[in-house]
């Protein structure tokens, strides 16, 4: 009983603290592995089996959705893991006809995989450098975000779910891009110029306020120094509003 | 759709899609800066869960409210739909509209006294027996009804069983309420007797036959009604002024003779009008019941009995000869 009460407290704390959530997942990794093993009928390998990653993600989901007074958390986590693994298995069934690149190829004495035999069209070294550059840029991005008191997880929580709201945020971004002084002002003051954005773009301040964290992140990506991220977002265009 | 992995945690990763969304996805052994084409997205967070639950609760409450409204409307319609009427005729004539549950849903005064009787009477949530008692009391108070008076009840409904039961119940209720000092009757009011149809209805006097369409005759034909016989000329009451011996001509449908007979009859009546007092004796003799020779026929003009007998013989002889000719 005391143990159950302690878990509840940890889960409720983890709902608001990312580090606590990570710590709780690490703490309960054996439990997550056991639930995954029940489903895949073998012991999952950390960093290798995607089922284990999915199970950890399901545990995190259960943590976020848990409410006090709704029963034991571990039961909820167990059901959540099982459901997620079933969904993942069904999704993967669609690819049963395809051949994995990790399929071993019998080549006499040497044990090589299909991936080793296949001639790669890309250059691994170039890709590695690109990924390193991207990682550095993302670290810098996360650092600048932290100057606003934000993390990427906070941004993800504040990201608009509906298409219409996302479109409104994109209109605000388009207005800021047309007025670079607003972006410079935001970086300098560490504050989102909500009034100018709402007045200039003709948008509701309340909507922008609700997604303030997301707007900070997306506007920050369009300041100097984040070309890789902008390159990924190059398809974002100023979309026209829905026709009346 | 490609996703850019921005942050990795043991339980999840933050990915940026090409539309600019930052998403929490399952960390399938990703590295920061990695590009991927398929992710497992987060289904729902605590806030969304709260929203979904509150929306579901709101929908449940709304549906319950809608059901309650429907039930209220249905019961309201059931309560207000008239199922039958009770008509109370004292001198005031009042009609009480009642619903299926015998609650009064309307009062109507069918005459001025009835309107005066129901004026100011509140019938809400009162049953038919209570309302009839109240109206009876009120009629007594207003002087419309006294001991020995009569209340005539007429219950009407499409449901005959319900009508009969309601009638019996109200009669019993009123008898108990008035202590039988007032006569309660359900006999219908004796309306003014309808005038019988002069054409299709039989005459009250059974001796007079009803009108038969097949017996329609031409207005030019002599009437067969006994009442039209003048008692003078039509001896055998067969519509002509001749005896049966001379009826052969008429029996074969030759109407001309009848017309001539009528013509003669008219002439006779015209001459009768011009008769001198001396001639009246002859006419009176014609009107007397004939027997013997006088039973045969009466001459259309003024003749004494001998001359009339002679004429009748001659007529008979001539008609016999015509009948021979016709046979030929």
Image (cartoon, rainbow, N blue to C red):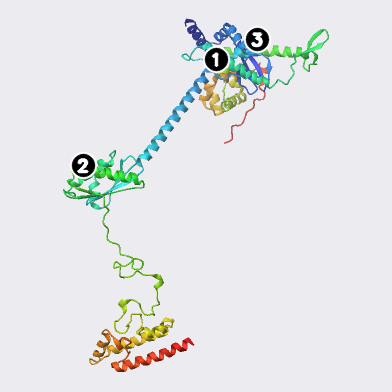
Q: Earlier in the sequence, mark 3 or mark 1?
A: 3
Q: Chain of mark 3?
A: A
Q: Residues within 10 Å of mark 3 (few under 14, many from 20)?
A: few
Please state which of the two labelled residues, at mark 3 or mark 1, is closer to the viewer.
3
Instruction: Work out whether residue B54 can be spotted.
Output: yes
- Would you place residue B47 above or below residue B155 in this image? above
Q: Dot 2 corresponds to which residue?
A: B176
Q: Chain of mark 1?
A: A
Q: Which of these two is toward me, B203 or B53?
A: B203
Classify mark 3: helix, strand or loop.
loop
Q: Residues within 10 Å of mark 2 (few under 14, many from 20)?
A: few
Q: Quadrant of the N terminus of chain B?
A: top right
Please state which of the two labelled residues, at mark 2 or mark 3, is closer to the viewer.
2
| Residue at the image position 33 percent from the left and 39 percent from the top | B101
Classify mark 2: helix, strand or loop.
helix
| Residue at the image position 73 percent from the left and 12 percent from the top | A128
Q: Which of these two is toward me, B242 or B244?
A: B244
Please state which of the two labelled residues, at mark 1 or mark 2, is closer to the viewer.
2
């Amino acid at each position: 009983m005391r143990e159950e009460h302690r878990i509840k407290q940890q889960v409720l704390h983890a709902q608001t603290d990312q580090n606590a959530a990570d710590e709780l997942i690490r703490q309960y990794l054996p439990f997550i592995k056991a639930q995954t093993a029940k489903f895949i009928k073998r012991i999952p390998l950390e960093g290798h089996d995607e089922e284990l990653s999915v199970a950890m993600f399901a545990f995190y989901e259960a943590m976020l959705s848990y409410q006090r007074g709704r029963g034991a958390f571990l039961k909820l986590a167990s059901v959540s893991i099982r459901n997620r693994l079933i969904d993942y298995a069904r999704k993967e069934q669609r690819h049963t006809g395809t051949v994995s690149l990790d399929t071993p190829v019998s080549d006499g004495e040497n044990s090589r995989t299909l991936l080793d035999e296949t001639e790669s069209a890309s250059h691994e070294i170039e890709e590695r450098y690109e990924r390193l550059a991207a990682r550095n840029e993302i670290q810098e991005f996360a650092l600048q975000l932290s100057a606003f008191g934000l993390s990427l997880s906070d941004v993800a929580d504040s990201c608009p779910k509906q298409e219409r709201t996302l479109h409104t945020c994109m209109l605000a971004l388009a207005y800021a891009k047309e007025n670079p002084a607003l972006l410079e002002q935001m970086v300098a003051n560490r504050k989102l110029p909500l009034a100018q954005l709402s007045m200039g773009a003709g948008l509701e301040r309340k909507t922008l306020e609700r997604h303030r964290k997301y707007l900070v992140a997306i506007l920050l990506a369009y300041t100097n120094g984040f070309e890789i991220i902008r390159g990924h977002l190059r398809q974002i265009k100023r979309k026209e509003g829905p026709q009346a | 759709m490609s996703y850019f992995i921005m942050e990795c945690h043991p339980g999840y990763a933050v990915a940026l899609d090409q539309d600019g969304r930052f998403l929490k996805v399952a960390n399938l052994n990703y590295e920061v800066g990695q590009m991927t084409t398929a992710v497992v997205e987060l289904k729902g967070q605590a806030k969304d869960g709260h929203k979904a639950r509150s929306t579901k609760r709101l929908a449940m409450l709304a549906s319950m409210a809608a059901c309650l409204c429907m039930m209220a409307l249905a019961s309201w319609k059931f309560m207000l739909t008239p199922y039958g009427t009770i008509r109370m005729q004292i001198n005031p004539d009042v009609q009480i509209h009642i619903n299926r549950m015998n609650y009064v849903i309307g009062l109507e005064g069918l005459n001025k006294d009835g309107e005066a009787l129901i004026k100011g009477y509140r019938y809400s949530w009162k049953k038919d027996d209570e309302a009839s008692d109240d109206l009876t009391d009120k009629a007594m108070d207003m002087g419309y009804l006294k001991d020995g008076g009569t209340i005539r009840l007429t219950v009407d409904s499409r449901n005959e069983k319900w009508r009969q039961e309601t009638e019996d119940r109200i009669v019993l209720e009123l008898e108990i309420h008035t202590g039988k000092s007032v006569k309660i009757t359900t006999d219908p009011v004796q309306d003014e007797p309808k005038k019988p149809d002069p054409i299709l209805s039989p005459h009250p006097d059974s001796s007079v036959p009803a009108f038969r369409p097949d017996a329609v005759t031409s207005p030019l034909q002599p009437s067969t009604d006994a009442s039209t016989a003048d008692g003078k000329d039509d001896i055998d009451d067969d519509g002509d002024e001749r005896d049966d011996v001379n009826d052969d001509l008429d029996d074969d449908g030759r109407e001309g003779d009848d017309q001539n007979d009528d013509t003669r009859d008219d002439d006779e009546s015209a001459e009768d009008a011009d008769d001198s007092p001396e001639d009246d004796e002859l006419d009176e003799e014609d009107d007397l019941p004939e027997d013997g020779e006088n039973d045969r026929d009466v001459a259309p003009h003024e003749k004494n009995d001998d001359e009339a007998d002679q004429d009748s013989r001659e007529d008979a002889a001539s008609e016999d000869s015509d009948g021979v000719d016709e046979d030929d």
